[in-house]
Image (cartoon, rainbow, N blue to C red):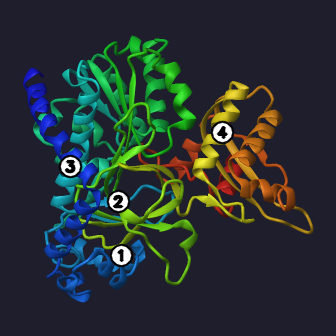
Amino acid sequence: MAFINSILSLFTQKRLVQIEHFKNNPVKVQRDTLQELLAKAATTEYGRKYRFNTILTAEQYRERLPVIHYEEISNDIHRMMEGENNILWPEEVKWFAKSSGTTNAKSKFIPVSPTILEESHFRGGKDVIAIFNKLNPEAQVFSGKTLALGGSSEVSRSNNNCQFGDLSAILISNTPFWANMMKTPDSSIMLMSNWEEKIEKICETTVKEDVRCLAGVPSWFLTVINKILEKTGKENLHEVWPNLELFIHGGISFTPYREQYKRLLPHPKMKYMETYNASEGFFGLQDDPTDPSMLLMLDYGTYYEFMPVSEMGKQHPKTLLLEEVEPGINYAMIITTSGGLWRYMIGDTISFTSTKPYKFRITGRTKLFINAFGEELIIDNATEALKRACEQTAANVFEFTAAPVFMDEGRKGAHEWLIEFNTPPENPENFAEILDRELQKLNSDYEAKRLLSLERLKLHIARPGLFNDWLKEKGKLGGQHKVPRLWNDRTHIDELLKMK
């Protein structure tokens, strides 16, 4: 491992200079990125359609091309999967990430070009190492092994021209040899499609390894951690892996899980880094342990625009360039990538906490919110209110979802919450009262509607394992699949309540 550490040290120094460059020159770096993308794709079918070779400025690009969703390019992507080239991107694309960011039955297949794989996904992973080494020069994390927990990692060959699977499967299948030397377990286990069998194998094979770093979605890692503690009879994870000191997490908010991780990983040396790596690209990472915001990574071959949430649904929505955004406003993120996505609405909402440098928080999903009564409740409100309610009642939340109860025959509406607890509150009614009160403090629209059209929220306590059983029934049990925590109709909560 000494050889690997020396290589990492050299890479770190060079890469940190490049990161400082885009932090100091964000607008220039982004405009250069856009021109490079347009030039590379000018002769593609999409590039000829929108005359990329005549677009000279970011403003012209914004005016000429529409903001698109997956549905608008799904036929083009299907043609790419059938082996047609030069449609959205000039490179031959053989890998497609099967989107698992939602429990909708319909799958998305996101092109993963050789360029975006190397210059976005893998560069992001290496930057996590570079920044962690800068912040913690004395750490020995990468002298041991990393346990990276992926999702349902089956790679399916659709035809001779392409392969598709979860992003984690694609990354594992293309990981360079030097990185594989630092990971556990081996890829034959990580690529297993049966989630429950894979968890058993992970527990069997990693407990004797020198694991120093964990990487994955917080909710699913709890399953692994609890299984390992059950098998070993240990009280916390440091008793299993005494050199463990870093958890790289992403995919969902860490807020509801923070206290549980403090209990399971109590050593003061334990450190945490949040990342934002989606099927469409790697977009952000935490570069300051005292600041939960993430640094927007501007030199990964992704060009960004931002749509104020207030513009969503309009016939001609306004989007902002990087230099036009303001802190504290919710934006839907629009991306243009070296994977062939052009002004693509990824579906996440963010809020900037700083513009020097550009740092942000993920606030939710464009489809994951409740606005049945004008209350505009977003994930960020929900997770913070849950955190506060747990602090006041000594409860611990494992998973949750919420949906509206619509007005009926003169009755007010409400929000209905279904929560699976690790540690339930002694008094569920008191918990519901506190949660409702904290939501009002965090969201003035919710507070106003509570006075007019909403009753106090309704709380159901889920039996242990309910959410896992629901995901399993849908064939979505695994580390990258997520429960839809807020939903604007009752599709999901009614299914769950039937299983409660």
Sequence-earlier tag: 4 or 1:
1
Disc 3 and disc 4 in contact, CB within 8 angstroms: no
The numbered disc on residue 74 is: 1
Question: Residue 139 in the image: x percent, y percent?
Answer: 26, 20
Q: Marks 3 and 2: which is nearer the front?
A: 3
User: Pointer 4: residues within 10 angstroms few (<14), some, or many (20+)?
Assistant: many
Of labels 2 and 4, earlier in sequence is 2
Give residue 386's mark.
4
* Residue type indicated by callout 3: His
Q: Is residue 377 above or below residue 392?
A: below
Are there few (<14), some (14-19), or many (20+) residues within 10 Å of tag 2?
A: many
The label nearer to you, 4 versus 1, is: 4
Q: Which residue is mark 3?
A: 21
Query: Is mark 1 in CB contact (under 8 Å) with mark 3?
Result: no
Mark 3 or mark 2: whose residue is earlier in sequence: 3
What crowding class fits label 3: few (fewer than 14 Cα within 10 Å), some (14-19), or many (20 or more)? some
Q: Is 45 on the left-hand or right-hand side of 326?
A: left
Q: Nearer the viewer, residue 115 or 15?
A: 15
The amino acid pointed to by label 2 is: Lys
Q: Quadrant of residue 428?
A: top right
Q: Earlier in the sequence, mark 3 or mark 4?
A: 3
Whether residue 126 is visible to the viewer of this picture, yes or no, is: yes
Dot 3: element: helix
**Rendered image quadrant of residue 265:** top left
Report if the CB atoms under discs 2 and 4 are less than 8 Å apart.
no
Frontmost of labels 3 and 4 is 3
Q: Quadrant of the C terminus?
A: top right
Spatial separation of the CA atoms under disc 3 and disc 4 = 39 Å
Indicate the position of residue 450 as horizontal and vertical percent values: 82, 55
Disc 1 secondary structure class: helix
Residue closest to the eye, 42 or 448: 448
Q: Looking at the image, is mark 2 or mark 1 earlier in the sequence?
A: 1
